[in-house]
Amino acid sequence: MGIKITRTLRILFVILIVVYIGMSVKGATVSQTSFDQMSKVIAKYQNKNTQLGNNQAIKRLYKLNPADYEGVLLYQPSSTMNAEEILVIKLKDKSQANDVKNAIEARKKSQLNTFKGYGATQTDLLNKSIIDVQPNYILYVVDPQASSIDDAFKKAL
Amino acid sequence: MAFNTITFLFFFFPITLLLFFLTPKKYRSYTLLVVSFVFYCWGDTKNLIFILFSALFSYLTALEIDILKQENKEKENKIVFITAIVVHVALLAFFKYTGLLSMPLGISFYTFSVLSYIFDVYYGKCHAERNILDYLLYVSFFPKVISGPIIQFHDFKNQLVHRIVTRKGVVEGTQLFMLGLFKKVLLADQLGMAYSAFHQTNTVIGSYLTVISYGLQLYFDFSGYSDMAIGLSSIFGFHFGKNFDEPYTSHSISEFWRRWHISLGAWFRDYVYIPLGGNRVDTRRHILNLIVVWLLTGIWHGNTFGFVIWGLYHGFFVIGEKYFFKHLHEKIKPGLQVFITDVIVFIGWVFFFSPTLPDAFALLGRLIGVHTGGFISSQTIYYLLGNGLIVIVAIMCCMPIVQRSYQKIFMLNKKRNIVNLILQIILFIVCIAYMIGSTYSSFLYFAF
């Protein structure tokens, strides 16, 4: 391969990398997935350790008003001895992301305090929990399968 | 896909082995290339295109460097070389430090492998690889692609050309893989539970146990992964050196870094420290070179100040041992040297695992009795009773005598082949039972 071809191809690949990254960043702006579609994906991961939470539960546990968002789905622990929990929120706009993230972190901290001292398994689950902030979706998952649930969430975006 | 998953152990690996041995010898590298891409896609489909583009860019860069060398165009060559380094470092920095996109799996290890290739070609350690498939195998070889060891290109190329798959290599590789699985599943994951438990306490003893359990977990987790990676490579005919060599028995911090994550240390030595002049410069410059290396080591691990401080902290002791307290160090008895080295290393881990600097300093404070919940509490005793044994077992497993005993008992040898084989199978079954019975646990170094 001559130097001219090598150089041209080399530059071409740099351009392709930049374009790919640019498109990925742009593509990461908003997901077109409807909240119903997302809920169906996440619902597959509900088990006996969690139960569907209503709007009151969202207000009580996260101090968030569900009406402020395009969609909120909560699977809360089915008993006080469980730490498993899944929360998915579709934001109306990106500026809400920080407040939701802070609310989730506060909830996680509160749960860690609750289990402090006696619930090593629950604490371990909480420490391995995932908060995945996407431009218009946020997932919080405390579950032994947290990574798989997060993967499914990402794929559904 | 991690090595400690049922999918890997019972599906991916057996199928890979089958395909590898069914393929005619001449084409086995290509089988490995295909399965390596499948392995990578399993964990990160989105970024495969990026990895491919980036690998092709470095492949072409090396070709261009080779051509310019032949034409004696040094100045132009230097520009191409520096541009390539800048592009790869900038990409790593973009993914690792901006947080705009999810990090491609293993990008830190991938980037260092690619940079090693460009350095090797530029400095004449090897010629540019013409066979693009061989080069892509170097970049994507599944045992090492996610968390190393970082294999330098000239080493890999030699193995690619001259490797022979032998029965001995397969047996030794399998045994090393088993040792790694044992370290990960039976030690690291249990130590992770202990660490989580101790971390909840705020007593002096609880804080010491937090630091000790993390340091042990990290060692068994990463050295376990490395053993599995090196073992798998050996099965396919690639023989790579150790990545860990009983680091907690080191007599100094300098020695510790010759025994801990050896491939990363070698990378920084060969591609940063030596090009900067190494120790063949005056004292001031040498100290500056060491500071640069340790600063970069810290930054490579993460983007928080904790990692920077952790890197510089180690640099401080390496420089100190060389110039400031060398004589004092030599006067200390060997046993005490090991103890002091471990104390320094374990204190350093506080910066490594603490999410923020205030958290790190709060924990360090508790180690000396500042803002604690007392020296020991009933809660600490409760956790100690539940997790003390695994900590003691792990400490013992760091000792050379235990490691040698393991080799005698579990590694196959001519005298006791059958007994050792049965023991290996039992160990494997126990590991599987633990894996099935517990939550999946990723490897700590996947995060870097």
Image (cartoon, helix red, strand yellow):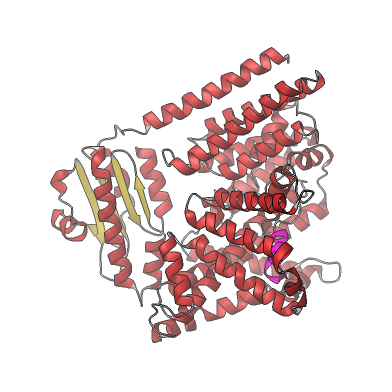
Prevailing SS of the magenta stretch: helix
Question: Considering depth in this image, is B227 or B211 the residue closer to the camera?
Answer: B211
Residue occupying the point 75% across, 76% down: B401
Residues rendered magenta in the picture:
B244-259
Q: Name the quarter where the N terminus of chain A is drawn.
A: top right
Question: Could you tell me residue B343's position as x and y percent?
Answer: 61, 73
Q: How many marks?
A: 0
Question: Considering depth in this image, is A114 or B237 the residue closer to the camera?
Answer: A114
Question: Could you tell me residue A139's position as x and y percent?
Answer: 32, 48
Residue occupying the point 64% across, 38% down: B140
Q: Quadrant of residue B35?
A: top right
Residue occupying the point 71% across, 45% down: B151
**Visible in this render: residue B443?**
no
Q: Name the quarter where the C terminus of chain A is drawn.
A: top left
A151 displayed left or right of B8? left
Question: Could you tell me residue B306's position as x and y percent?
Answer: 49, 57
Q: Say above or below: A104 vs B208.
A: above
Q: Say above or below: B35 vs B257.
A: above
Q: Say above or below: B224 vs B378.
A: above
B84 displayed left or right of A108? right
Membership of A27 in magenta stretch: no
Single out the residue that lies furthest toward the right.
B414
**Visible in this render: residue B399?**
yes
Q: Say above or below: A135 vs B63.
A: below
Question: Considering depth in this image, is B112 or B149 the residue closer to the camera?
Answer: B112
Question: Could you tell me residue A99's position as x and y percent?
Answer: 24, 49
Membership of B247 in magenta stretch: yes
